[in-house]
Image (spheres, rainbow, N blue to C red):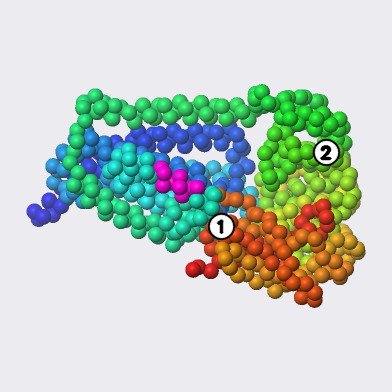
Amino acid sequence: MADSALGWKSNRQMIALMVSQLRQLLPFAMLWAVLSGLAYTYELFSTRVDEQDFIDWCSTACGTGSNLDQLLFLLFFCMLAAYRLFPREFDDGTIDFVRSLPVAKSRIFFSKVLTAWLLICALLTAEFLITSSLLQFNRQTISGQNYPATLSMILLRDCLFALVIVAHGVFISWFRVTGLVLYCAYLIGLYWLEEAMGISGIFSLFRFYNSEFFDQQILFDWPAITAQLIIAALLLTISYRLWNKTESQPRAKRAGIVSKYGPGFMVVIAFLLASIALVASIANRHRSGTSANINHLATEHYRFSYSKADQAQITELLQFADQDYQTLATLLGVENRPFIQARMTLSSNHAFGYASHTEIRMKLGDGRPVNPLYRRVLSHETTHVFQSVESNRALSKSRNSVGFFLEGMAQYTSFAVVPDSVRRDTNWTISSVAWQRQNITFGQLANRTVFDSTYNPELLYGIGDIWVDAMARQCGEQSPGEFLRSLATSNLPPNLQGEQYWRLHLNDIGCDLEQINHLWRTQMQQIADQRTDGAFPVYSNVTTSTRDDQLLITATVTPDENGSQPERYLIRIASETSIANRPPRVLTGRVISTGSNTQVQFSVPLLNITGQRYRYQIGFAPYPDSRHYFEKWRNGTIPRE
């Protein structure tokens, strides 16, 4: 009985000790809550809640090598918690009182670690509950579904990462400022190796966030996570011995005041700085930049913001902008014609333009002539604005089912406003050959998640263009615009998807999906069968190997029925695990043998592939100046040495 009573008393003192540790960490919990609250506030002001679906969220939290901001955020707070709990008690002498309690030193040490870790896990859990609640606002289509198992696994990963960083923080806090400086140098070195050289060993912290989302499951790099947990256990063991041998070193009383009120002061300062940044960010979304290098010019339908260096291109573009806008609006039967903010300062190597409701961002400054390229890009993005306004943003709620229509309709209208028969014909030919060879169905086209993971995503533009053309010929020239307006007032169930979505919504405007698809398939078959130009060889016997720090992908190439071969063979390759979340790289192959058994080899530096898993598409340039043709995505694994 005496032993039992003593154990109960010891447990109560242990709990009281953890509560005391928790009080010390409350300022940091407040800082976390303030910053998270401001982040959610920014999201509410800058985006519509009902447009944020699981795919949008998961592209950051689940995507390959993504969520670096969350990694750094957790790292920062775990370090703060460790420095708050350990050096502070030794510096102000309170550790002597704690050690005088009838609690084992090991329990004192691990109570501190456990308190910091449990508090961070509780804050993470609260954030995930809020995120899950917000995702409930958009449950339309497969992209709007919620996946509790995935959310739970991501929460587990973040909690394990927090435990590892707390262990690091407890260890380096023994070295005070010196430890923090060395740890920062360690992180910078890791990040540099990842960014500059593509190296990410199993002992790298960044491997914690090497994840993939596959078949509705989140996949983690468990060997790397296990290695980090083992290292964390070793660091905690070493830290326990270091701190237990350390005597208190009380500071002067004045320093104690700074230590006592410093965290609260930090919370206030952080709140003010974050509030200022939030207000500035929201304001910047509604006004153009005031940089001395940016000019502004308004027309009847647009307000352009552009670099002074692009004045000549803007001057030429202005000759057509309003006229093209009106032609486009007439084609679609648009009556409520929005005024568009056109920011012509986009910096991107992967796209000429983006559109978000009534705002367009475009890229200029590469020396290309305005007529017809940028006229067509502007018309393309203006179509996206009309799609959003005319449907009252209904299309954005079903993006997984309508992705091909969004891009196909923008292609269809832009070529109608700014004709270019040669470029459009080559796009249609490439799309039709891919459709024929890769057996693309409308069901796959109406599921963008499946399409992008299987085929070349750029095919959505050409195949979608042909489908919208078939729709216009079958249902009338203004049927695409009528379809948009019908979505704004539709009473159909909101969870429709795929073919069912299209069949029921087309019925609302008197169109039949089967008739459109029949016309669409017939046209694509004719284009593919009647092709007389271009080079479309067939790949076979694809093999992979490694040699001298290179990944070698070799394939046999058989000429098409015309007997022609392309001038360039291409490969698009992406690492499945990369902290930088880089877009796929496109590289050129070389012919290594000719004749009846022509072979092409692609050489990819292993430094460009993080981890063992990668995916790739092999293709070619069928015409001198056209979109590229790519086969389906293939997966590969680099052998472990």
Residue 20, which numbered label? none
| Between 78 and 183, the one nearer to me in the picture | 183
Q: CA distance from mark 1 to mark 2?
A: 37 Å
Q: Is 26 one of the magenta-colored residues?
A: no
Q: Locate residue 516 relative to residue 602 in the image: left or right.
A: right
Report x, y in % for residue 16: 22, 42
Q: Residue at x 77, y 51 (%)?
A: 461
Report x, y in % for residue 233: 31, 56
Start-end of magenta stretch: 184-192
The residue tagged 1 is 607
Tag 2 or tag 1, which sits nearer the N-term?
A: 2
| Between 156 and 315, the one nearer to me in the picture | 315
Say which element carries label 2.
loop
Name the quadrant of the N terminus. Answer: bottom left
Q: Quadrant of residue 435?
A: bottom right
Kind of residue indicated by mark 2:
Pro
Say which element carries label 1.
helix
Q: Residue at x 67, y 42 (%)?
A: 348
Select label 1 or label 2 by which is in front. 1
Kind of residue indicated by mark 1:
Leu
| Between 20 and 492, the one nearer to me in the picture | 20
Report x, y in % for residue 462: 80, 53
Report x, y in % for residue 430: 81, 58
Magenta stretch, overall SS: helix
The residue tagged 2 is 369
How crowded is the residue under tag 2: few (<14 C-alpha within 10 Å), some, or many (20+)?
A: some
